[in-house]
Image: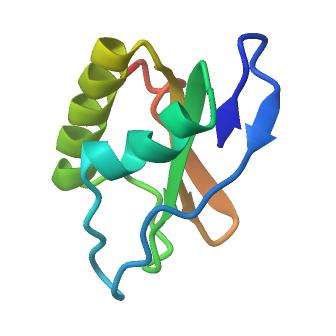
C-alpha cells in the first residue's frame, strides 16, 4: 500500500505473484511503484499459504533490505504484514521495524 505523508492510502499495488512456497521481490520493484506514485511511506504485505503467519528467515532478511532501501529513497516502511488464513503477523508489532 502506498501512503501519503499522513499515512492515508494513495493506492494499493501487486508487486509480485509467487509460487506456492516462494515469491521473488527485489527492492527496486518494491519501491518503483512507490516512487512513481509519490508515496511518502508504504505498508508491505504478503501471504503464507501454509496458514502459519510466522515470518520465515527469508522474510526477515527481505524486510531488512526493504527498510534500508526505503531509508535511502526517503520512503518509510511503516509495517510489513504476513497474512495467513485468519491470522497475521506484523513486523511493527514484533518490534522488527
Total residue callouts: 0
Where residue 60 sits in the image (x, y, percent)?
Answer: 24, 41
Where residue 48 sits in the image (x, y, percent)?
Answer: 45, 70
User: In the image, 64: left or right of 36?
Assistant: left
x 28%, y 43%: residue: 27
The image quarter in which residue 83 lies: bottom right
Q: In the rendered view, tell whether residue 70 sits above or below residue 37.
A: above
The image quarter in which residue 97 lies: top left
Q: Nearer the viewer, residue 96 or 32?
A: 32
Where residue 12 sits in the image (x, y, percent)?
Answer: 70, 52
The image quarter in which residue 22 lies: bottom left
User: In the image, 44: left or right of 37?
Assistant: left
Residue lying at the far bottom of the rendered structure = 20
x 78%, y 11%: residue: 6
Residue lying at the far front of the rendered structure = 36
x 17%, y 40%: residue: 61
Q: In the rendered view, tell whether residue 20 sits above or below residue 87.
A: below
Specify the quadrant that holds the N terminus.
top right
Q: In the rendered view, tell whether residue 78 sits above or below residue 63.
A: above
User: In the image, 55: left or right of 33?
Assistant: left
Q: Nearer the viewer, residue 78 or 36?
A: 36
Q: Nearer the viewer, residue 59 or 40?
A: 40
Amino acid at each position: 500500500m502506498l501512503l501519503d505523508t499522513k499515512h492515508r492510502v494513495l493506492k494499493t499495488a501487486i508487486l509480485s505473484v509467487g509460487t506456492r512456497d516462494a515469491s521473488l521481490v527485489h527492492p527496486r520493484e518494491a519501491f518503483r511503484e512507490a516512487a512513481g506514485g509519490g508515496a511518502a511511506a508504504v505498508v508491505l504485505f504478503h501471504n503464507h499459504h501454509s496458514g502459519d503467519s510466522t515470518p520465515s528467515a527469508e522474510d526477515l532478511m527481505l524486510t531488512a533490505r526493504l527498510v534500508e532501501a526505503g531509508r535511502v529513497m526517503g520512503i518509510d516502511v511503516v509495517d510489513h504484514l504476513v497474512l495467513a488464513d485468519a491470522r497475521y503477523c506484523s513486523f511493527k508489532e514484533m518490534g522488527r521495524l
